[in-house]
Amino acid sequence: MDFTNEKILQIAMEQSAIDAACRPEDFLRSENVIALSVANQKARKYLCLPFDCNLISYGANIVASIDEKHRAVVTDYIRRYPVEHCFETPGLHVLNDALQKDGLRICFMAEYFLPDLRMLESFDCPYRMRLLHSADFSALYTPQWSNALCEKRRELDVLGVGAYDGGKLIGLAACSADCDGMWQIGVDVLPAYRRQGVASALTSRLAWEILEQGKVPFYCAAWSNIQSVQNAIKSGFRPAWVEMTAKPAAFVAKMNGKES
């Protein structure tokens, strides 16, 4: 497939529309949109659908994919604040407090990046790089490679690039086939080998490999993960959309190592 930046963005919006049970053009409207969440086999594999409350913005507005019972709360919230303030404190405390009455809490907040073909290039690093496939990952489902690979969804890990110091794997970027048209990149570099350009070399190389497979690479980072965001930008990716998801309070407590 011949990609352009515009085509890449359109594919991402089409996938977000599947995930949110809305239309791609809804993300370009000037007004906010409420969509009732439903399960969809074509949604990103790691999503748990239907959503109770998931807010998505590509910058122009907010699309809220929700359970009907939260319509009044969410509608009031996204009407009250500007788009950018809905995804940050102090505003989000208002939504969290309202949802908490129904047993929900704000859980996930993330920024998603897409490649900018004007900036994406292949970087070199001081170490030999090698293209890897699913069969090469079997011994790599260990804590040091947990950002690049996901043990719970091994079947989705399809392609990677490793960096080697002699015969030792010191960095790994890998991607999961999370949906039909888009593959998500994760990257890990051993602490002793960081700040040498390894992560950006692996990420950019893998992004090109994904594009050659006819898929769109995407990259996710928490706003506070400065190192990950810097790697995305250095590798030729640019911010495309943001999401904020509420989950049951028991789920949040479990993630925090507590019982609700």
Image (spheres, rainbow, N blue to C red):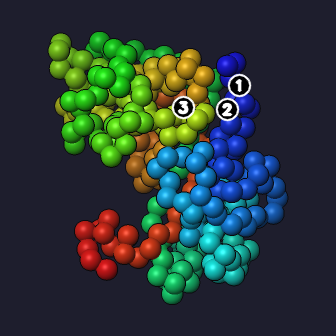
- Crowdedness of circle 2 by 10 Å Cα count: few (<14), some, many (20+)? many
177 left or right of 194?
A: right
Q: Position of residue 35 (x, y in %)?
A: 71, 64
Q: Type of residue at label 1? A: Thr
Q: Position of residue 117 (x, y in %)?
A: 63, 24
Closer to us: 64 or 21: 21
166 left or right of 93?
A: left
Q: Type of residue at label 3? A: Pro
- Crowdedness of circle 1 by 10 Å Cα count: few (<14), some, many (20+)? few
Whether label 3 touches label 1, CB < 8 Å: no
Look at 66% across and 75% down and name the residue there.
Answer: 68
Q: Which mark is residue 4?
A: 1
Look at 44% across and 74% down and name the residue there.
Answer: 248
Q: Type of residue at label 2? A: Ile
224 left or right of 115?
A: left
Closer to us: 39 or 194: 39
Whether label 2 touches label 1, CB < 8 Å: yes
Q: Can you identify the residue that label 2 sits on?
A: 8
- The N terminus is located in which quarter? top right
Q: Which mark is residue 217?
A: 3
In primary-sequence order, the first of circles 3 and 1 is 1
Q: Estimate the spatial distance between the alpha carbons at disc 2 and disc 1, rounded to whole Å.
A: 6 Å
- Crowdedness of circle 3 by 10 Å Cα count: few (<14), some, many (20+)? many
Residue 174 visible? The answer is yes
Closer to us: 208 or 50: 50
